[in-house]
Image: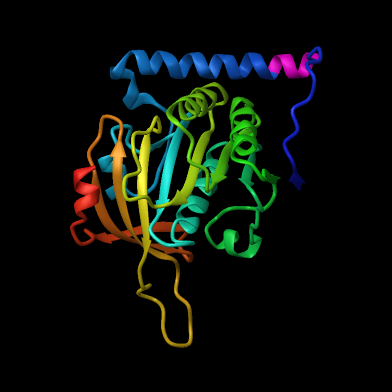
Amino acid sequence: MLLSPRPSPTEPEPPAAAAMDRAGLLAGLRARIARLDPGLETGRATLPLSPELDAYLPWGGLPLAGLHEVLAAEPGAGMGFAALLLARAQAALPGRSILWIADEPDAYPPGLATLGLSAAGLILVRAPRPADALWAAEEGLRCPAIAAALVMNVTPDLTAARRLQLAAETGGGIGLLLRGEDEAPGPTAALTRWRLAARPSEGGSAHQIGDPAWEIALLRARGGRPGAWAGEWDALRGELRVMGAAPPNKRALGA
């Protein structure tokens, strides 16, 4: 399904939409209460990544109802990792849809399926302007029928990022910002910021492409600590294998 965001005039909400809004409001209130009491952070609903990565995150996994950033060291490096996160959100929130927002959305279902992401419920949104992309993401994240919204190649300012974070708290899904790496990525309202670089797969050969493999750096986690690892997707087991620490990354450790 391919959509283009077009704001519509304000109309009275039907009873079903009002009920969804009430459910989203309750989810947002629960998330805000958790933010006001840091002691409740550990009870926040999360997406498991791997034991090694989860141990570095103060929530014990990647928190739902939040905004996250993925910086790609080279084109395509972060796509597989972002798809993995979308798949985890899809599994954690069954029945909800995934928004894939870009100026020219180009998703390859067979490739996504190897990372556990089903094309069922995947909605492609064409947003030629950054303002369109951010509007579509914010509206989508507020809706409790959306498990995740991926926004590609858009860098929101702090105000827009805070709006996305609040929208995710309301709807209960996750927002993902996927963009190229900057020398100075600047401040962010996201709960986590990751950096992904491609690395050779251990299972690859001259005649066969192995599973996706990355150097994974956690640049920032609210209330957590940075870290760096080497990881690989194991398609056979359907899990992310973290095989050991990646070489020290000065940018990651100093973020």
In the foreground, 134 or 64: 134
From the viewer's perspective, is 176 left or right of 111? left
Residue 72, percent from left and from top: 41, 55
**Quarter where residue 186 is shown:** top left
Q: Looking at the rendering, which quadrant does residue 245 occupy?
A: bottom left
User: Is 59 situated left or right of 94 in this image?
Assistant: left
Please name the residue shown 55% across and 63% down the image: 114
Q: Position of residue 136 (x, y in %)?
A: 65, 34
Q: Could you tell me residue 3's position as x and y percent? A: 75, 43
Residue 181 falls left or right of residue 235: left
Q: Which residues are magenta?
A: 14-19
Q: Residue at x 29, y 39 (%)?
A: 220
Check residue 5 for magenta coloring: no
User: Number of numbered discs present?
Assistant: 0
The residue drawn where x is 54% and y is 24% is 167
Q: Is residue 18 magenta?
A: yes
Residue 224, picture quadrant: top left
Tell me the residue at 57%/25% (across/down): 171
Q: Is residue 221 above or below residue 27?
A: below
In this view, 235 is above or below 252 = below
Q: Is residue 239 left or right of residue 184?
A: right
